[in-house]
Amino acid sequence: DLYHRLSVYPLRVPPLRERGRDILLLAGYFLEEKRPRLGLRSLRLDHEAQAALLDYRWPGNVRELEHLVGRASLKALGHNPERSRIVTLHRQDLDLPAETPAPPRSVVEPAPAAPTTGHSLRAATDAYQRHLIQDCL
């Protein structure tokens, strides 16, 4: 019932990769949320880390950004030997995964239809598999 009530006026929420500079605003929000939990006075991103966040192609959503900022905050805190209360996250703290291109899609031609007279399922399967192997070679 709730779905039908809400679907009267659909809202489109753009994916994170289409949100541009909103990524930095969201990252700042998550940093500010993590700061008191870690007992810090300041938690911020350097310019290279900001550029990395903007350049990354975000396959996920806002939650992916939140988790990334949380991991980077803990990592940066661990790299801070003097345990100062001001921590800056650097590009290497982000651990952004390397983008891998999508594998090329190949189109498989359908096998010719097997005649239906006098063939068993086993014979039809063997003929189909033979056809696929020949196409691959």
Image (tube, rainbow, N blue to C red):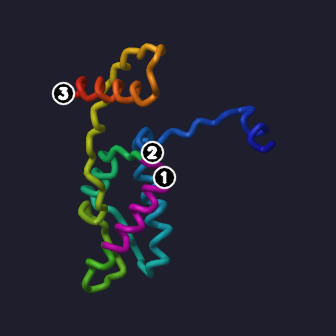
Point out the stretch of residues depicted in magenta. 60-75
> Is disc 3 placed on a helix, strand or loop?
loop
Q: Earlier in the sequence, mark 1 or mark 3?
A: 1
* Nearer the observer, 49 or 137: 137
**Label drawn at residue 137:** 3
N-term-proximal mark, 3 vs 2: 2
Q: Is residue 58 above or below residue 79?
A: above
Q: Is residue 64 above or below residue 80?
A: above
Q: Residue at x 49, y 56 (%)?
A: 63
Q: Report the residue marked by disc 2.
A: 16
- Three-letter residue code for mark 3: Leu
Q: How many marks?
A: 3
Q: Quadrant of the N terminus?
A: top right
User: Would residue 4 appear left or right of 38 to someone viewing this image?
Assistant: right
Q: Nearer the viewer, residue 47 or 11?
A: 11
- Left or right of residue 134, residue 36 in this image: right
Q: In the image, which disc is placed on residue 126? A: none
Spatial CA distance of label 1 from label 2 is 6 Å
Let me know if residue 73 is in the magenta part. yes
